[in-house]
Image (cartoon, helix red, strand yellow):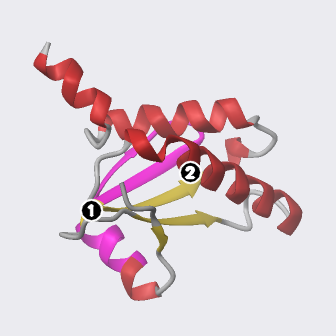
Amino acid sequence: MKRSESLKRQEDFSKVYREGKSKANRLLVLYVLPNNKSINRIGISVSRKVGNSVIRHRITRLIRESYRLSEDEFRSGYDFVVIARVKAKGTTYEEIRSALLCLARGQHVLKAADMEEIK
């Protein structure tokens, strides 16, 4: 599988917000939009409401690492935008990873979810 790229342009974020589907839990919100490409692109947004820059960057790193290590479990061809909620402040890597995978499962973008549906 090809590796993911980052969403960087405001237009790309806006398109995912406008046309994508969203799911949320207490830590994260996940927007998903098919991109008709063979790769995934991910954007991460952490508001100033969550905390100061040190806290925001830590949460961003946790989300990015959670996605990177689980990337092989995701189906290809999607744009993802992950938004951290205020409750994400002070959470551990395992909690962030679990929340991200739970949302991805709910959006039906995990390969393992396809296998479970077939059974």
**Location of mark 1 (residue):** 33
- Regarding mark 1 in the picture, which secondary structure is present there? strand
Asked if the magenta segment contains residue 106, the reply would be no
Number of marks: 2
In the image, residue 70 sits, relative to residue 65, either above or below, namely above
Residue 68 or 83: which is nearer the viewer?
Answer: 68
Residue 52 image-quadrant placement: bottom right
For residue 25, above or below residue 58: above
Q: Is residue 109 above or below residue 16?
A: above
Q: At x 47% / y 87%, what residue is drawn?
A: 9
Q: Nearer the viewer, mark 1 or mark 2?
A: 2
Left of 64 or right of it: where is 109?
left
At label 1, which amino acid type do we have? Leu
> In the image, residue 115 lies at what x, y percent?
21, 24
Q: Which residue is mark 2?
A: 68
Q: Quadrant of residue 48?
A: bottom right
Left or right of residue 54: residue 38: left
Examine the rendered structure and indicate whether residue 47 appears above or below residue 85: below
First to last magenta residue range: 13-32
SS of the residue under disc 2: helix
- Asked if the stretch drawn in magenta spans residue 27, the answer is yes
